Structure formats: C-alpha cells, structure tokens
Amino acid sequence: MLEVHQFPCLSDNYGFLLHDPESGETAAIDTPDGAEYLKQADAKGWKITHIWNTHWHPDHAGGNGAIKDATGCEIVAPKEVERISPIDNLIAHGDKVKLGEWEAEVVDVSGHTNGHIALHIPKARMAFVGDSVFALGCGRMFEGEPQQFWDSLDRVRQWPQDTTLYCAHEYTQSNAKFALHADPDNVELQLYSDEIDAKRERGEPTVPMQLGRELKTNPFLRADANDLRKRWGGSNPAETFAALRTAKDNF
C-alpha cells in the first residue's frame, strides 16, 4: 500500500511525501519548503524521485529547485508552474501519472488559480487537492471565476465518499467558524466543529479529511443545497458559491 508522510512546514502548510514501498519511489506533493522535504525524506530513508505540483504558488512549488538539485527527481506539474520552476513532465486534466504501479488521475480543479490540478488515486481512495478544497472550506478565488470554481468542486464531489482528501493548509478552525455562520442549522457541522476544536486543543492536525463528511458540512461543496441557496441567494449553484466565497473573503 502507498504510505503518506504528513508534516507541518512554513507557518500553516502541510507537506506530504507519498511513498510506494514496492518500487521505492517517493513523490513530494508540492514543495513549500525544499530543505524540510529533504530532511523529512532522509529521516524516513526515502529518496524523492518525483515532485507532483498542484499549482504555481510559491508555497506549493517554491522548493522545486532545491529538491531537484539534491535528488535529480522528475518535476511533474501543470503548465502554470513554469512561472517559477522548470517542468520535466507537463500534465493537464485527463492525464495520468504513475508512482510505481499506482496511477493518479489529473483533475482540473481550477478557480484558486487557472491551472490548478488535483491528483486523484482511485485505487488508494485518496486525492491531493492543494488549495482547491480545504476542510470546511476552499481556496480564495485569485484567478478564476465562480462557475469555473464550482465546476471544479463538482468534479471533486463525484469521487467516492470514502476518498481521503489531503489539503495543503491548517485552516480548519477558521473555516469552521465561517461554515457555522453560513449554515447555522447544520447539526453534523456543529459536531464536526466541536471535534476540530478538540483536535487543535490537543495539537493534532485536522487534515486529511473524508470527502463524505465534507459533502455534508462544507458550505462550498453544498452550494447546490436548497437551504444554502435560500439563505445566500443565487439562481444556480455557481451564484450561491460566489456569494459564499465573497462572504468568506470578508468574514
């Protein structure tokens, strides 16, 4: 089975090393801090053979050069990453990439940036979603449009509900506060928020999360729900999503 090593880096990022024991290959999922990734890989006894970037922001691709120089690994990324790093293997929606015999599907989740992708590994029931989806939230809409971002989230919603989502930041407590403001009658959300507070009190991460639970509690994934559309307006889910995103930006 694939092994995921998760560790904190920078101020609120999570780093991920994805390791296939059969082949010995290891992918660095995004590279917020190249030195920390190399340190973590060395501690595990793993050599980084690939970098898989989700988007171009420096806290996701800024460590590419340091890791490439140290390991000679292959940089696998969407075209937008060329803004800050060379790419060895250019990927886009519909492509597939492999780590050993494990296959990841490249999925367009643009909206936070226009070239943002996720890496979905169906047989492992996991996905690395960068800044497209957070626990109880989603990324800011820096480059995209509401319909584009909603379509991206809808693609994520189609994955099996037992899919484990690895997102890139520990934003969950603040996301929960907005989610409760956006959807105050959601009992499942209230329970989830209490669990999040308890985890953070113990110093535990709230990432990864399960898609099935997010579908019940994350307001950005529920923008098509009648109760949210009544509360936030919009003649279609994209308009409701836009209203929620604007409200979160100003919350």
Image (tube, rainbow, N blue to C red):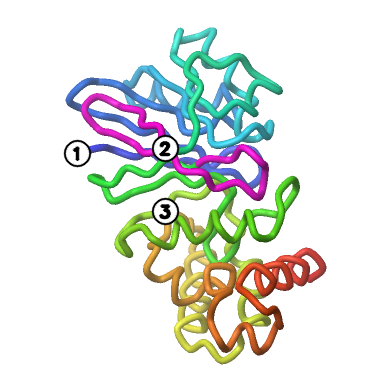
Residue at 45% x, 83% y: name it: 188
In the displayed structure, does residue 58 sit left or right of residue 95?
right
**Looking at the image, is mark 2 or mark 3 nearer the viewer?**
2
Residues 107 and 121: in front is: 107
Task: Report how far apart the C-alphas of labels 1 and 3 lie in the structure.
Answer: 17 Å
Look at label 3 and name its amino acid.
Leu
Q: Nearer the viewer, residue 4 or 226?
A: 226
Q: Give the numbered dot on residue 221.
A: none
Which residue is rendered at x = 55% and y = 46% of the image?
168
Mark 1 crowd level (few <14, some 14–19, many ≥20, 10 Å Cα):
few
Q: Which amino acid, by three-letter code, is at mark 1? A: Met
Q: Which residues are magenta?
A: 94-117
Residue at which label 3 appears: 165
Furthest toward the bottom, the residue is 185
In the displayed structure, 5 sits above or below 36; it is below
Badge 2 amino acid: Gly
Q: Quadrant of residue 160?
A: bottom left
Alpha carbon distance from label 2 to label 1? 24 Å
Instruction: From the top left corner, tell me how far across and down residue 145 is, in percent.
Output: 71, 54
Q: CA distance from mark 2 to mark 3?
A: 19 Å
Residue at which label 2 appears: 94
Q: Earlier in the sequence, mark 1 or mark 3?
A: 1
For the residue pair 34 and 99, the one nearer the viewer reads as 99
Please tell me which residue is depicted at 34% across the width and 49% down the height of the picture. Answer: 126
Q: Give residue 159's position: percent from left, percent from top.
A: 35, 57
Residue identifier under label 1: 1
